[in-house]
Image: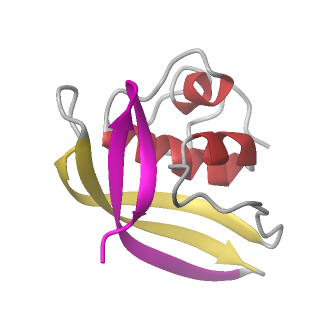
Amino acid sequence: MITDDSRCPCGLGEPYGVCCGRFHRGDATAPTAELLMRSRFSAFAVGDTAYLTKTWHPKTRPADLELDPGQRWTFLEILGKTGGGLLENEGTVEFRTHYRQDRRADSMHENSHFVRVDGQWLYVAPVR
C-alpha cells in the first residue's frame, strides 16, 4: 500500500504525496510530458484508473479501463524523450516499465506520444 509518505513509484525519489500524488488528487497538472508519463506509471502502480482515463486523449482512450490485479508495477526507466517541455505542445517519451505478473518479473518497452490540450498533457498512443 502506497501512502503519501511512501517513496513515489515514478522513480524520482520524492514522497508520493508531493510527487505524483498531487497530480492524482488534482492539486496540480503535470507540466511536462515526462512528468505526465511518470505520473501515469505511478497511477498504474497505485491502481488509479480515474487518473489514467483523465490523462488519456479522448480519441484513443478505451471505453473501459480495468487493471489486472495480478500485475504489480515495480520500476520505471526513462530511456529518452523529444519535445514535451514547458513551452511545447507535443512530445514523446521512451521508457521501459518493469512489473511482476503472477510472481514472474517482466518488462514493457514503449515510445509514447503526448500532446498538450488546453494546458494539460495527455497520453495519445505508442509511436508507430
Q: Residue at x 65, y 47 (%)?
A: 53
Q: Is residue 27 above or below residue 69?
A: above
Tell me which segment is drawn in magenta. 104-128
Q: Quadrant of the N terminus?
A: top right
Which quadrant of the figure has residue 48?
A: top right
Q: Quadrant of the C terminus?
A: bottom left
Prevailing secondary structure class for the magenta stretch in the rendered image: strand
Identify the image's colour scheme: rainbow, by chain, secondary structure or one colour: secondary structure
Q: How many marks?
A: 0
The furthest residue to the front? 59
Q: Residue at x 54, y 42 (%)?
A: 55
Q: Is residue 59 left or right of residue 63?
A: left
Which quadrant of the figure has residue 34?
A: top left
Q: Is residue 113 magenta?
A: yes
Residue 80: x percent and y percent? 21, 59
Residue 61: x percent and y percent? 59, 57
Q: Residue at x 17, y 26 (%)?
A: 87
Q: Is residue 125 left or right of residue 99?
A: left
